[in-house]
Amino acid sequence: MGVKYKKDNSWLVEKIKEVVQPLCQAENFELVHLEYVHSDRENIVRLFLDKPGGITLDDCIYVSRQLGDLIDVHIENIGSYRLEVSSPGPNRPLNKKEDFHRFKGERVKIETNELIENKKKFTGILEIINDDSVVIAVDEKRVEISDHAISKAILAGQ
């Protein structure tokens, strides 16, 4: 049956974030993404972390050990789960406005929830970050995409 997202897990994700954020701040890690998923066999708490210079395997092991204990102490009734801590990888999601500023000049893929110039998928160089939109260079022309139209944005690598 594969992986299914629990519909009522938003409270749990928020509780886990409350436990994760102080650890991340203390260690100078950025919490890129956190999810709680349920598959046929187990529950999974999955974190994607980043830091200047990138996340190492040792960083992931350290956070996993620390966080597992913190979750067990601070979150009642979570039940059994598997904790996965990793780097967001080369296709890092861009979730916050700060992410767009940080990766200005990089190649990105953006999907929109509405048609812009008869398309919903764009790949190009992130050039301008405005208060309520971004501009990317796509095939020698610039495309402005409003923040509310972006459904997904990731780094596209080379």
Image (spheres, rainbow, N blue to C red):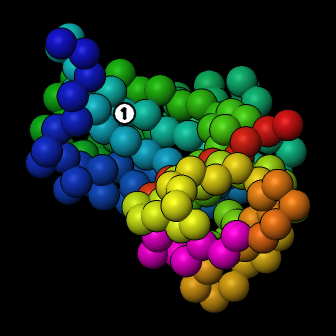
Location of residue 139 in the rendering, given as x and y in whole percent from the top left corner: 82, 55
Drawn side of residue 33 relative to residue 79, left or right:
right
- Image quarter (top left, top right, bottom left or bottom right) of the C terminus: top right
Q: Tell whether position 98 is magenta.
A: no
Q: Label 1: state its secondary structure.
A: strand
Which residue is at the front of the view, 151 or 95? 151
For image coordinates 70% across by 50% down, the residue present is 123
Q: Quadrant of residue 42?
A: top left
The span picked out in magenta is 143-149
Q: Tell whether position 148 is magenta.
A: yes
For image coordinates 79% across by 39% down, the residue present is 157
For image coordinates 33% across by 27% down, the residue present is 44
Which residue is at the front of the view, 124 or 45? 124
The count of marks equals: 1
Q: Residues within 10 Å of mark 1 (few under 14, many from 20)?
A: some
For image coordinates 73% across by 78% down, the residue present is 129
When the figure is inspected, residue 48 is found, relative to residue 80, above or below; the finding is below
Location of residue 152 in the rendering, given as x and y in whole percent from the top left corner: 50, 53
Residue flagged by tag 1: what amino acid is it? Answer: Val
The single residue placed furthest to the bottom in the displayed view is 131
Quickly name the residue at label 1: 45
Drawn side of residue 43 relative to residue 61, left or right:
left
Drawn side of residue 37 relative to residue 11, left or right:
right
- Image quarter (top left, top right, bottom left or bottom right) of the N terminus: top left
Location of residue 101 in the rendering, given as x and y in whole percent from the top left corner: 76, 71
Which residue is at the front of the view, 145 or 9? 145
